[in-house]
Image: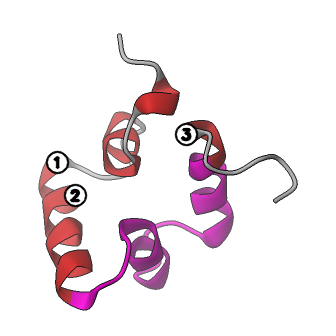
Amino acid sequence: MIKESLLLLGEMLIQKKVLTDAQLQTYLEKAKASGKMLGELLVAEKIITKEELFAYLREQGFLRNGV
């Protein structure tokens, strides 16, 4: 099993059942077309909150607690 901290954001959101694979592909295409990062787009689309994004990024090890 892959450690959760090594998962990409999209893979993590599929694992946590926030998105389906098809939804992820759609949002990845939208992110690429808009020049936004996936997390930024998902917050803008109100799929996840900014706080949830920060929590997922902390799980990945990109943010420290309190940041």
Q: Is residue 44 magenta-colored?
A: yes
In the rendered image, residue 38, in percent from the top left (x then y), is placed at 36, 68
Measured Cα–Cα span from mark 3 to mark 2:
18 Å
Query: Relative to 37, is 21 above or below?
Result: above
The residue that appears at 57% across and 60% down in the rendered structure is 53
In the rendered image, residue 16, in percent from the top left (x then y), is placed at 42, 38
Q: Is residue 41 magenta-colored?
A: yes
Mark 1 and 2 residues: CB-CB less than 8 Å, in contact? yes
In the rendered image, residue 40, in percent from the top left (x then y), is placed at 46, 76
Q: Which residue is mark 2?
A: 24
Measured Cα–Cα span from mark 1 to mark 2:
5 Å
Quarter-of-image position of residue 7: top left
Instruction: State which region is magenta.
Output: 34-57
In the rendered image, residue 9, in percent from the top left (x then y), is placed at 40, 49
Query: Relative to 55, is 29 above or below?
Result: below
Secondary structure beneath label 3: helix
